[in-house]
Structures are given as C-alpha cells and as structure tokens.
Image (cartoon, grey):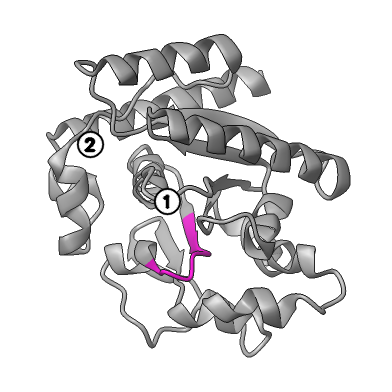
C-alpha cells in the first residue's frame, strides 16, 4: 500500500508546486513509483509538466463524470492533471454528503499501484485542501523563510490539528521544508532559527536554495532533474528525498 502525502501551504509563492513536482520526480529517481495529483485549480503542476487542458482531469473525476485516469510522464511517474474548471468545485461539492472524503475515496483504488501518491494542494484552506489532508497520511509544508510566511504556518498548523481531531486521526506533519533559501540573508537565517526553536523535530535538515533552474524547468515542461541534473535545485531536492526516505526507514524499523 502506498503512502499519501499532501504538499500544502495556503500562502502562494512558497514553492509548493515546485516541491510537489520535484519531490515526486526525486522519489521516482530513487526507484519509487509515484502518482502526482494536481488539486490546484491554477493547474500549475500539470502545465509545468507539459500537460494542456483537454486531458481527463481531477475535476471530472471528483464530479463523478468519469474515473480518474493517470497519465504517464516517465517510467514509474504518473499524474492526474487539473483544470481551471476545478475552481468551481468548492461550491459544487459544498452540499454533498461526506464531501470531505471525496478525494480519499477517489484515490483509494490507486494505492496498490504506487509507493507514493503526492497531492499538490490549493493555496487556500477551503474544501479541496480539507479533502487533501483527509486523504493523506502526511503533510509536507514548504515555507519561504520570511516572517509573513511564519504567520501563515501558525494558521496552517491549527487547521491540521482540527483535521487530526475530526476527520483524519492518522494524519501527521511529515516536515517543514525551507524553500528559496539564501544563507547570505540575515532574515532567512533568523526565520530558520525561529522554526528550529518553535517547531523542533518538524524541520527537514535539507533546505532548498534559490536556484534559477527551478524557475526555468517548468517553462520546458520538465522537472529539475531532467532540465538541469547538475543544478543546486536538483541536488537539494534529491537530498530532501533521501532524507525523507531515511526518516521513513527509521520510523518503520
């Protein structure tokens, strides 16, 4: 059975989608079978991997129009894409019974085929994000090292606690990953130190450094490993995936 991981932060511009793509691609590079699910109506994950509108997508599957059909990107790496139409799902599903569990039921049949299912959550705290967290075993929180991002982290932790109490008792915080890090900036170092002191044990040791390859890769429809395999971005995300798998190993054993 696979592990379901949400990549979540309701603040935009923190590297959420970039992390979803490259954590998925990094785990695949390390020999894992991975399914990416684009649950963001902006469809940035789908577009960043070269998928255009018109494919069977998560919106139609959530509405029950058809079964979700993963699209192959690489050997062992598939995606269920999104569409701009998903923006209407929050209202459309609000009256549905068991609306918080729709995504969990949808992805259940896929668990036997993948080691990891990674969900790119919307940059909000609405029904779709609640669905993602309810369906997940873990949530990874990308965080830009700025003080405004810290305020958002506090709110997100509160939401996660509510989900744990009411909808998904097994949900845990897989870790906080610092993105767009520049050790030359005092502010970046101060924020990291604050997180170490206040969220002890939740912070990944690997930090994702600022790197132009991470911004350029989506313009070519590629993850950073295929676009610039020797870049700092590729090095950092591979290191993060290795750290994640190592932590998983020690938890199991």
Q: Which residue corresponds to the image point at 59% horizontal and 14% vertical from the top-left?
A: 198
| Residue for badge 2 | 234
Q: Which residue corresponds to the image point at 14% horizontal and 35% vertical from the top-left?
A: 231
Q: Nearer the viewer, residue 173 or 161?
A: 161
Q: Nearer the viewer, residue 109 or 147?
A: 147
Left or right of residue 25, residue 244 in this image: right
| Residue for badge 1 | 12
Disc 1 from disc 2: Cα separation: 22 Å
Q: Earlier in the sequence, mark 1 or mark 2?
A: 1
Classify 4 as above or below 146: below
Query: Pointer 1: residues within 10 angstroms few (<14), some, or many (20+)?
Result: few
Query: Pointer 2: residues within 10 angstroms few (<14), some, or many (20+)?
Result: many
Q: Position of residue 3 (x, y in %)?
A: 62, 44
Left or right of residue 178, residue 172 in this image: right
Classify 219 as above or below 18: below
Q: Nearer the viewer, residue 138 or 144?
A: 144
**Magenta span:** 35-43
Residue 93 in which image quadrant: bottom right
Q: In what quadrant of the picture does the C terminus appear? A: top right
Tag in front: 1 or 2: 1
Residue at disc 2, secondary structure: helix
Left or right of residue 185, residue 83 in this image: right
Q: Position of residue 111 (x, y in %)?
A: 64, 56
């Amino acid at each position: 059975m696979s592990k379901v991981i949400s990549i979540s932060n309701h603040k935009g511009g923190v590297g959420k989608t970039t992390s979803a793509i490259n954590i998925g691609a990094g785990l695949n590079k390390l020999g894992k079978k991975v399914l990416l699910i684009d649950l963001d109506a902006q469809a940035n994950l789908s577009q960043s991997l070269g998928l255009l509108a018109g494919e069977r997508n998560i919106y139609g599957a959530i509405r029950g129009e058809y079964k979700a059909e993963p699209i192959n990107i690489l050997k062992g790496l598939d995606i269920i894409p999104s569409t701009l139409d998903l923006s209407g799902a929050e209202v459309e599903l609000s009256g549905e019974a068991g609306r918080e569990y729709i995504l969990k039921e949808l992805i259940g049949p896929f668990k036997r085929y993948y080691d990891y299912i990674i969900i790119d959550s919307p940059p909000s705290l609405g029904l779709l994000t609640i669905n993602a967290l309810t369906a997940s075993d873990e949530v990874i929180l990308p965080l830009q090292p700025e003080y405004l991002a810290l305020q958002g982290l506090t709110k997100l932790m509160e939401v996660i606690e509510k989900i744990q109490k009411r909808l998904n008792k097994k949900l845990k915080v897989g870790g906080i990953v610092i993105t767009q890090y520049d050790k030359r900036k005092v502010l970046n170092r101060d924020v990291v130190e604050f997180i170490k002191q206040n969220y002890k044990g939740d912070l990944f040791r690997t930090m994702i450094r600022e790197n132009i390859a991470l911004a350029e890769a989506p313009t070519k429809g590629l993850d950073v490993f295929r676009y610039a395999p020797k870049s700092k971005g590729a090095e950092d995300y591979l290191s993060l995936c290795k750290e994640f798998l190592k932590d998983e190993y020690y938890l199991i054993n």
